[in-house]
């Protein structure tokens, strides 16, 4: 066998390929890790996680946007009621139409839009990770030199000027008197 394992030792495969028996391969100085800390350190694969088909908005992103029920759109004030049968049929027609129209639109447009939004957020992440953050870091490094020069100029020229002005005008007293 390769890898220095003895023939009597069985190979153990863990849930994540990023963990080995001696410790995390990204921190090879870690010695034997107990089972609890090993389970805590395993990496979760976001591509194979199970999705919740019951609670499809667990972070409540659309709570205030798309909660439109029949009562939110069509309401009859007291004294102007239609026939009960018309009211029930209107409710059923509205609810079923909204339900099936939404389902058909998601069937036709949902997957292409998911593709578009996936590409958009991938590009946005790429630009942020590979352009914006390095640019900001570079700017912070460059501006540090400028800030040192600026600080030296302020302390050399402006501090003595304002200190002298403070001493000159420090003894000025203003008194307001009311003339009768």
Image: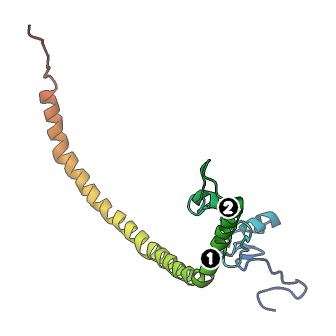
Q: Which residue is mark 1?
A: 101
Q: Is residue 27 left or right of residue 167?
A: right
Q: Nearer the viewer, residue 14 or 124?
A: 124
Q: At x 68% / y 76%, what residue is drawn?
A: 45
For residue 132, which quarter of the picture?
bottom left
Q: Are marks 1 and 2 in contact (CB under 8 Å)?
A: no
The numbered mark, 1 or 2, whose residue comes first in the sequence reads: 2
In x, y percent, where is residue 25? 68, 76
For residue 107, which quarter of the picture?
bottom right
Q: Which secondary structure lies at badge 1?
A: helix
Decide: few, some or many residues near mark 2? Use Cα within 10 Å; few <14, some 14-19, many ≥20: some
Q: Nearer the viewer, residue 40 or 72?
A: 72
All told, the count of numbered labels is 2
In x, y percent, where is residue 127? 44, 76
Q: Nearer the viewer, residue 32 or 174?
A: 174
Can residue 63 be spotted in the picture?
yes
Q: Which secondary structure lies at badge 2?
A: helix
Task: Nearest to the eye among marks 1 and 2: give it.
Answer: 2
For residue 87, the mark is 2
């Amino acid at each position: 066998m390769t890898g220095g394992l003895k023939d009597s030792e069985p190979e153990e495969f863990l849930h994540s390929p990023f963990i080995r028996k001696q410790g995390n391969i990204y921190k090879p100085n870690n010695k034997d890790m107990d089972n609890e800390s090993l389970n805590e350190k395993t990496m979760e694969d976001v591509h194979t996680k199970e999705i919740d088909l019951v609670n499809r908005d667990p972070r409540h992103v659309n709570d205030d946007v798309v909660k439109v029920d029949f009562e939110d759109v069509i309401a009859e004030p007291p004294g102007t009621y239609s026939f009960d049968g018309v009211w029930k049929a209107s409710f059923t027609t509205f609810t079923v139409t909204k339900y099936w129209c939404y389902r058909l639109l998601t069937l036709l447009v949902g997957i292409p839009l998911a593709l578009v939004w996936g590409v958009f957020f991938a590009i946005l992440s790429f630009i942020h990770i590979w352009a914006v953050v390095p640019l900001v870091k570079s700017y912070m490094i460059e501006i540090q030199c400028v800030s040192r020069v600026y600080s030296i100029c302020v302390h050399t020229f402006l501090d003595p000027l304002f200190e002298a002005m403070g001493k000159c005008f420090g003894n000025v007293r203003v008194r307001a008197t009311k003339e009768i």
